[in-house]
Image (cartoon, rainbow, N blue to C red):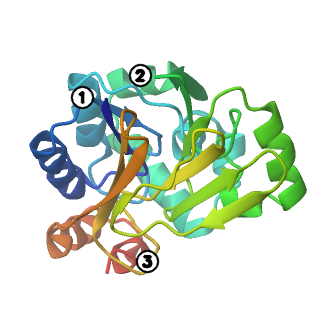
Amino acid sequence: MRVAIISDIHGNLDAFRQVLKDIEASGIDAVVCLGDNVGYGPEPEQVIRQVRERNIPCVMGNHEQAVLDGEHLNWFNPPARKSLQKTMTLLSEESFKYIRGMKSSLVIYESRFVHGFPPDSMNIYLFQASKNTLKQTFREMKERLCFVGHTHELKLIGFDGKASQRISLQKGIVKHLHKDRKYIVNVGSVGQPRDGNNNAKYVIWNSSEDSLEVRFVPYDIAAVVSKIMAAGLPKVHADRLW
């Protein structure tokens, strides 16, 4: 089975559309979304509609959490807070209802899916976890694989029962998943990559081959930048796309 895992679309409909085209051309059996469909980008309503229309299972991200809860909104820096406040005016009541129904984690295909860090954190970044925290988390994790987003970066962490190992994920196919190890897979960002490459990113997990494929998808960044500025969103979120 080939499952596409997407995350952190952040209202970037142009990037999302190109990723969906790539997914459709790649012979995918299923898609799972790791949250943060909103925030930063100019078209959060349209992104949510696409996710809903395609019946893509999706967990709640910290940006979804923030549009529902003022306490979490205050955690963000001023530009991100301004972006989220603008985002709230762009969302329909249907989208708010959809967001309220999101779960903090999903277990499907015998794997765990969460925005930030297992088992169900929307706010903890993978890079914040110490070796001891990772060891304890892996030992408590019932699933062999856990897919996360939140950092907007690509990363693979393996655990052999004694120690964890951080492995870089690059464009292409990675075939070093071992049946006797557990993994946390950080799948990158569709709408706002922060790994030094401005293509939209997502990961394909092939459960039959026990492999991961990292996909880089180009899109019209200039068009999104124009939309961000026209919407009155912070310029920093346009500049980051480049």
Q: Is residue 122 visible?
A: yes
- Residue occupied by mark 3: 236
Classify mark 2: helix, strand or loop: helix
Query: In front here: 11 or 189?
Result: 189
The image shows residue 174 at horizontal and vertical percentages of: 41, 59
Query: In front here: 79 or 108?
Result: 108
Please name the residue shown 12% across and 47% down the image. Answer: 21
Please name the residue shown 47% across and 46% down the image. Answer: 36
Sort mark 3 into few (<14), some (14-19) or many (20+) by Cα contacts within 10 Å: few
Which quadrant would residue 190 be assigned to in this image?
Answer: bottom left
The image shows residue 209 at horizontal and vertical percentages of: 37, 40
The image shows residue 53 at horizontal and vertical percentages of: 21, 24
Which quadrant would residue 27 be assigned to in this image?
Answer: top left
Q: Is 193 placed above or below 136 here?
A: below
Q: Which residue type carries mark 2?
A: Tyr
Q: Quadrant of the N terminus?
A: top left
Give the number of callouts: 3
The image shows residue 113 at horizontal and vertical percentages of: 54, 34
**Sequence-wise, which precedes: disc 1 or disc 3?**
1
Query: In front here: 89 or 51?
Result: 51
Q: Is residue 10 visible?
A: no
- Residue occupied by mark 1: 29
Q: Is 91 placed above or below 105 here?
A: below
- Residue occupied by mark 2: 98
Sort mark 2 into few (<14), some (14-19) or many (20+) by Cα contacts within 10 Å: few
Q: Is residue 126 left or right of residue 190?
A: right
Classify mark 3: helix, strand or loop: helix
Q: Which residue type carries mark 3?
A: Val
**Sequence-wise, which precedes: disc 2 or disc 3?**
2
Q: Is residue 106 left or right of residue 143?
A: left
Q: Which residue type carries mark 1?
A: Asp
Please name the residue shown 64% across and 56% down the image. Answer: 157
